[in-house]
């Protein structure tokens, strides 16, 4: 008799839950609003040179309250002098090779994190990837074949490991401008092996000219927008530029009918860090508070917007105890005041 009473109680609780969910959904529809989706509160997890255990993944989750990690295997290319793409090489870091990528994805999933797999191209000698272009059609065709092999290798891994989101390229403006038909074909080939959501990571000044957003699930933007010329900007200094940016991005999202995902975003802990946020090699002096203030204002002005799917903070290193800190002017928030800002907004 007690057994049947327990079953009835469970059924009653289940029925109440379904009714509650239905009421919330119908209320949202009646008000003309779509039910709110959880934001992608992501962290860009830098590959480790050597094999790691699950502790670094657990640490980033505890420290930031993230729900997504970007895992980023790199390929290397000499640029327009050689169309060969080198990846999954023995001399590469463990976390960038296929086996290391698989293990890192599995650890992220066990830690309750969804994954963006974001294979990226690195041009040797510091050349910007957005300017990559070849002079002959033969070189273009060779490079396209090499790049497709690279991307499909990791798209296949993404499929096998049930990765939630896959990025087909990062900041490759001239490649897209010169070879648009290749990208249409590449997207088709990716969809043959991977059925999850896909995006492309356009540079902040490139996204409006990217022609294939309607074939993807998100408008991906590496959001290093210049926001202020001030040495240490306050929230008031940033408000107008972020308001203008909000209007611009919202209009673009509506015109394409896709949400915007910040495939990268972040600010260095240094003076003038909102002036040219993409700068990684200059050093204008450590300013921990500037990083915290800019991030806080960035979240306040943009994160609650419906057209913003979320984003991936740049960046987090596996050796947390050695990363960041009071003397560090880089992007990482590790062991800096900005960390509490990120956790505050990612916990909402």
Image: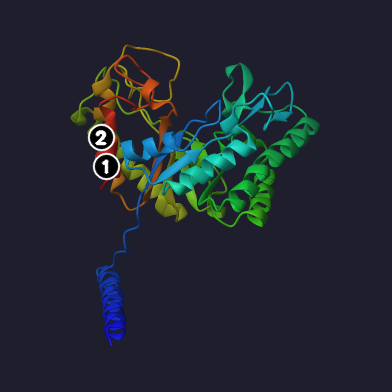
**Is 64 located above or below residue 17 in the figure?**
above
Q: CA distance from mark 2 to mark 1?
A: 6 Å
Label 2, residues with CA under 10 Å away: few <14, some 14-19, many ≥20: many
SS assignment at label 2: helix
Look at mark 2 in the image and give the residue it sits on.
Answer: 341
Which one is in front, 54 or 98? 54
Q: For the point 27% across and 45% down, which residue is it?
A: 347
Q: For the point 42% across and 31% down, which residue is it?
A: 314
Q: Residue furthest front?
A: 1
Q: Position of residue 179 (x, y in %)?
A: 68, 39
Q: Position of residue 207 (x, y in %)?
A: 49, 40
Which one is in front, 176 or 11? 11
Q: Which label is found at residue 227?
A: none
**Is 33 located above or below residue 181 in the figure?**
below
Residue 221 shown left or right of residue 128 in the figure: left
Residue 61 shown left or right of residue 1 in the figure: right
SS assignment at label 1: helix
Q: Are marks 2 and 1 in contact (CB under 8 Å)?
A: yes
Within the image, what quadrant is residue 1 found in? Answer: bottom left
Within the image, what quadrant is residue 277 found in? Answer: top left
**Is 197 located above or below residue 229 in the figure?**
below
Residue 113 shown left or right of residue 105 in the figure: left
Look at mark 1 in the image and give the residue it sits on.
Answer: 345
Q: Position of residue 52 (x, y in %)?
A: 51, 32
Q: For the point 69% across and 37% down, which residue is it?
A: 147
Q: Position of residue 236 (x, y in %)?
A: 18, 30
Q: Residue furthest right?
A: 138
Q: Is residue 257 visible?
A: yes
**Is 9 located above or below residue 301 in the figure?**
below
Q: Is residue 209 visible?
A: no
């Amino acid at each position: 008799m007690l057994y049947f009473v327990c079953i009835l109680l469970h059924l009653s609780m289940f029925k109440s839950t379904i009714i509650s969910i239905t009421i919330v959904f119908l209320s949202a529809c009646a008000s003309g609003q779509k039910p709110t989706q959880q934001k992608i509160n992501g962290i860009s997890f830098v590959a480790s040179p050597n094999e790691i255990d699950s502790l670094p993944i657990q640490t980033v989750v505890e420290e930031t309250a993230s729900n997504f990690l970007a895992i980023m295997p790199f390929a290397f290319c000499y640029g327009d002098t050689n169309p060969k793409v080198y990846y999954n090489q023995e001399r590469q870091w463990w976390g960038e090779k296929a086996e290391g990528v698989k293990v890192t994805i599995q650890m992220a999933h066990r830690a309750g994190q969804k994954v963006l797999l974001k294979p990226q191209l690195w041009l040797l000698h510091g050349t910007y990837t957005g300017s990559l272009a070849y002079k002959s059609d033969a070189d273009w065709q060779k490079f396209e074949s090499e790049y497709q092999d690279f991307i499909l290798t990791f798209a296949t891994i993404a499929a096998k490991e049930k990765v939630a989101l896959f990025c087909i390229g990062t900041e490759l403006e001239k490649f897209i401008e010169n070879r648009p038909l290749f990208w249409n074909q590449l997207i088709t080939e990716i969809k043959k092996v991977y059925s999850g959501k896909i995006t492309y990571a356009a540079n902040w000044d490139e996204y409006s000219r990217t022609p294939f957003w309607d074939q993807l699930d998100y408008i991906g933007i590496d959001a290093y927008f210049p926001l202020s010329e001030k040495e240490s900007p306050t929230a008031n200094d940033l408000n107008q530029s972020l308001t203008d940016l909000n209007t611009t991005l919202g209009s673009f999202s509506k015109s394409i009918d896709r949400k915007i995902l910040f495939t990268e975003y972040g600010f260095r802990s240094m003076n003038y860090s909102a002036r040219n946020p993409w700068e990684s090699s200059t050093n204008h002096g450590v300013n921990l508070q500037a990083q915290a203030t800019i991030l806080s204002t960035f979240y306040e002005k943009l994160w609650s917007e419906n057209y913003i799917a979320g984003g991936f903070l740049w960046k987090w290193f596996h050796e947390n105890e050695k990363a960041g800190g009071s003397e560090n002017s880089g992007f990482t928030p590790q062991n800096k005041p900005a960390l509490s800002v990120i956790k505050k907004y990612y916990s909402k």
